[in-house]
Image (spheres, grey):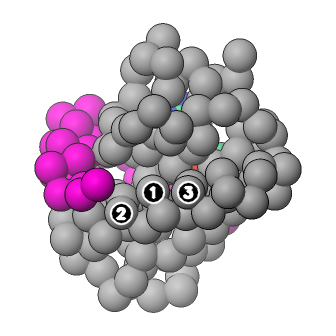
């Protein structure tokens, strides 16, 4: 089981932002900016483009609902999307609230936020996600 499968199954704690039978969204533990969120399929697939066309489409619709909620909670110009997958072999989309394109640079230093702040960001996003 990948670390992200364990997170989606609730076996490893996470700051949950949205969840349904097929997908799970949670805060990145090493955020580039406040509200940096990961969106995953529960099905364990390493490379995102190995998902079926239908899964990929549904994943993006789910991610869009999360991105709209992030934008309501975190003041930003737009929510950017990135796919890397070089570290964790379980397909995931990064959603990153941007003030400028510099916020998308993965070489930037990561924020260190308290558990309380992470929880309150995740709670605020979860409260805004619509089906
Ligand atoms: P990448 O696979 O290159 O897209 O990077 C994996 C991302 O997952 C990184 O941004 C990590 O900070 C994040 N990450 C790794 N482990 C966890 C975890 N337990 N909870 C939340 N985010 C994580």
Q: Residues within 10 Å of mark 3 (few under 14, many from 20)?
A: some
Q: Is residue 28 left or right of residue 42?
A: left
From the Cβ of disc 3, is ligand 1 less than 8 Å away? Answer: no
Residue 12 visible in the snapshot:
no
On the rendering, which quadrant does ligand 1 occupy? top right
Q: Is residue 59 magenta?
A: no
Q: Are marks 3 and 1 in contact (CB under 8 Å)?
A: yes
Residue topped by disc 1: 62
Q: Quadrant of residue 25?
A: top left
Q: Is residue 119 magenta?
A: yes
Q: Secondary structure at mark 1?
A: helix
Residue drawn 70% across the image and 45% down it: 91
**Where 25 sits versus 54, above or below?**
above
Image location of residue 73, percent across then percent down: 19, 65
Left or right, residue 65 beside residue 83: left
Res. 30 mark: none
Residue ID at (61%, 24%): 5
- For disc 2, does the CB lie below 8 Å from ligand 1? no
Range covered by the magenta-colored residues = 107-131
Alpha carbons under labels 1 and 2: distance apart? 5 Å
Neighbor class of circle 1 (other Cα within 10 Å; few <14, some 14-19, many 20+) is: many
Residue with the mark numbered 3: 58
Q: Quadrant of residue 4?
A: top right
Helix, strand, or loop for circle 3? helix
Is residue 105 shown above or below 30? Answer: below
Q: Nearer the viewer, mark 2 or mark 3?
A: 3
Q: Residue at x 80, y 40 (%)?
A: 46
| Residue 71 in picture, x, y percent from top left | 28, 72
Q: Residue furthest front?
A: 54
Q: Which residue is mark 2?
A: 65
Q: Earlier in the sequence, mark 2 or mark 3?
A: 3
- For the residues bearing labels 1 and 2, Cβ distance under 8 angstroms: yes
């Amino acid at each position: 089981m990948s670390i992200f499968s364990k997170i989606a199954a609730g076996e490893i704690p996470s700051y949950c932002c949205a969840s349904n039978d097929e997908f799970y969204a949670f805060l990145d533990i090493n955020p580039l900016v406040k509200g940096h969120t990961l969106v995953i399929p529960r099905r364990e697939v390493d490379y995102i483009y190995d998902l079926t066309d239908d899964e990929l489409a549904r994943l993006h619709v789910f991610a869009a609902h999360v991105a709209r909620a992030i934008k309501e909670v975190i003041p930003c110009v737009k929510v950017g999307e990135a796919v890397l997958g070089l570290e964790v072999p379980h397909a995931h989309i990064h959603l990153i609230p941007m003030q400028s394109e510099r916020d998308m640079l993965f070489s930037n230093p990561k924020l260190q936020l308290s558990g309380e702040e992470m929880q309150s960001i995740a709670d605020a996003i979860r409260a805004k996600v619509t089906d």
